[in-house]
């Protein structure tokens, strides 16, 4: 479903009654300017201000205190890709309801789980991973779950094809590990013409894509290729492990060649999903589909006999599902429930140590 680029007029926004993954859904016009308010799109979020685009120019705008409080009370915030209403004093007064949001959790290691919105109103997520030392297929399960929970189309993009000699083998390995409906392409981001040709099917005019991946994966280099001008700086990776140095420090929405828009994002060192068990069921649709063939109705897919999920999925993907399920359960617990669970674990640990002690004494 297309989202109009903020760099062309007239603005359009998706019909929110349709499923966000549909590419043929008709669009409806953004509500026209009322009074002194103008509809703009957020292209960059800074500490106290945002950069907005009105279809002609980009300008800085403040955010009203009322809107900040309203969003904070809902554990929400303005994000790149949002459509907003800006008054004559360049102050954002209202946010239009986002069609989708990509968000994650920030965990402080204790009881606090803060929700962080990454981007809003996107059609495609390019999951960028280098074919060098960044190559880690299991990490992709987490990224795919992130975007599928928002109803966004994931596309795996393997970069740095010019740096390795076994591109075909690694690409085939990635395709074999991914769900069948997730496309995967490998490319050299320094070859702008080839990169644009390979990704063109997911960048039609009016669509918005986001680049997600770890530092040094080649997101900013790919942004250069897709935008055809030097908009984002690029930097070297470390020689030892190929890790990046956070060249991109803020999320920025930029115009692509051909009329689409791209959001470049800083590298994610960790990704904790903002999900519950229902959201994970949507993200791991293959698990839910296969579960109907299990022998036991309450099968946990953890070694039970007759488990259709374990028989069909790779152990790595099943382990990813179990791990994300545990995270989702912890993140949806109240502080009291987490304390109760911790107490149970301590009791089990103490009981286990006591049994070992009794066995030694009996021997």
Image: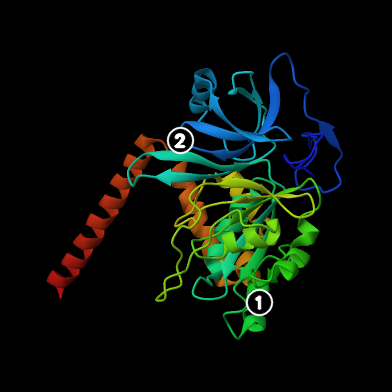
Q: Secondary structure at mark 2?
A: loop
Crowd tier of the residue under label 2, counting other residues whose Cα lies within 10 Å: few below 14, some 14–19, many 20 or above: few
Residue appearing at x 78%, y 34% in the figure: 11
- Residue position for label 2: 47
The spot of residue 282 in percent (x, y) is 66, 50
* The N terminus - image quarter: top right
* Residue 319 vertical position relative to residue 337 in the rendered view, above or below: below
Q: Position of residue 347 (x, y in %)?
A: 26, 50
The relative height of residue 191 versus residue 329 in the rendered view (above or below) is: below
- Side of 13 relative to 315 (left or right): right
Q: Which image quadrant for residue 125? A: bottom right
Residue named by callout 1: 171
Residue name at image x 60 percent, y 23 percent: 90
Colour logic? rainbow
Instruction: Residue 66: give its label.
Output: none
CA neighbours of label 1 inside 10 A, class few (<14), some (14 to 19), many (20+):
some
Residue 319 at x, y = what percent? 52, 65
Please name which of the two marks, 1 or 2, marks the residue nearer to the observer. Answer: 2
Residue 196 screen position, x and y as percent: 74, 64
Compare residues 126 and 304 and report the one nearer the observer. 126
Which picture quadrant has residue 37? Answer: top right
**Residue 225 in sight here:** yes
Residue drawn at the location 47% of the way across and 31% of the way down: 48
Residue at the bottom extreme of this rendering: 165
Which is more toward the observer, 55 or 305? Answer: 55
């Amino acid at each position: 479903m297309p989202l109009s680029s903020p760099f062309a007029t007239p603005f359009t926004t998706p019909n929110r009654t349709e499923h966000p993954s549909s590419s043929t859904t008709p669009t409806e016009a953004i509500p026209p300017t009322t009074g002194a308010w103008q509809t703009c799109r957020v292209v960059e979020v800074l500490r106290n201000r945002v950069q907005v685009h009105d279809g002609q120019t980009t300008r800085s705008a403040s955010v009203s205190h009322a809107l900040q409080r309203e969003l904070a009370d809902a554990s929400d915030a303005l994000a790149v890709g949002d459509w907003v209403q800006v008054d004559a004093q360049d102050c954002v007064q209202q946010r239009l309801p986002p069609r989708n949001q990509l968000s994650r959790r920030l965990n402080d290691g204790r009881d606090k789980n803060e929700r962080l919105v990454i981007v809003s109103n996107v059609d495609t997520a390019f999951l960028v991973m280098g074919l060098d030392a960044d190559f880690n297929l299991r990490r992709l399960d987490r990224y795919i779950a992130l975007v599928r929970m928002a109803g966004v189309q994931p596309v795996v993009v393997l970069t740095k094809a010019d740096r390795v000699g076994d591109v075909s083998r690694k690409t085939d390995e990635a395709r074999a590990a991914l769900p069948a409906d997730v496309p995967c392409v490998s490319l050299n981001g320094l070859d702008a013409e080839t990169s644009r040709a390979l990704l063109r099917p997911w960048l039609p005019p009016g669509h918005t894509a986001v680049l997600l991946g770890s530092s040094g994966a080649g997101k900013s280099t790919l942004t250069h290729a897709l935008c055809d001008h030097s908009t984002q700086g690029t930097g070297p990776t470390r020689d030892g492990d190929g890790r990046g140095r956070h060249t991109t420090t803020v999320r920025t929405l930029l115009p692509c060649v051909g009329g689409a828009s791209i959001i470049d994002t800083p590298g994610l060192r960790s990704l904790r999903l903002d999900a519950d068990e229902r959201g994970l069921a949507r993200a791991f649709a293959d698990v839910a589909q296969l579960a109907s063939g299990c022998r036991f109705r309450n099968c946990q897919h953890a070694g039970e006999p007759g488990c259709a999920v374990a028989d069909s999925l790779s152990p790595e993907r099943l382990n990813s599902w179990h791990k994300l399920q545990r995270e989702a359960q912890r993140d949806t617990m109240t502080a009291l429930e987490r304390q109760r669970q911790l107490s149970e674990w301590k009791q089990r640990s103490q009981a286990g140590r006591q049994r070992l002690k009794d066995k030694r004494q009996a021997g």
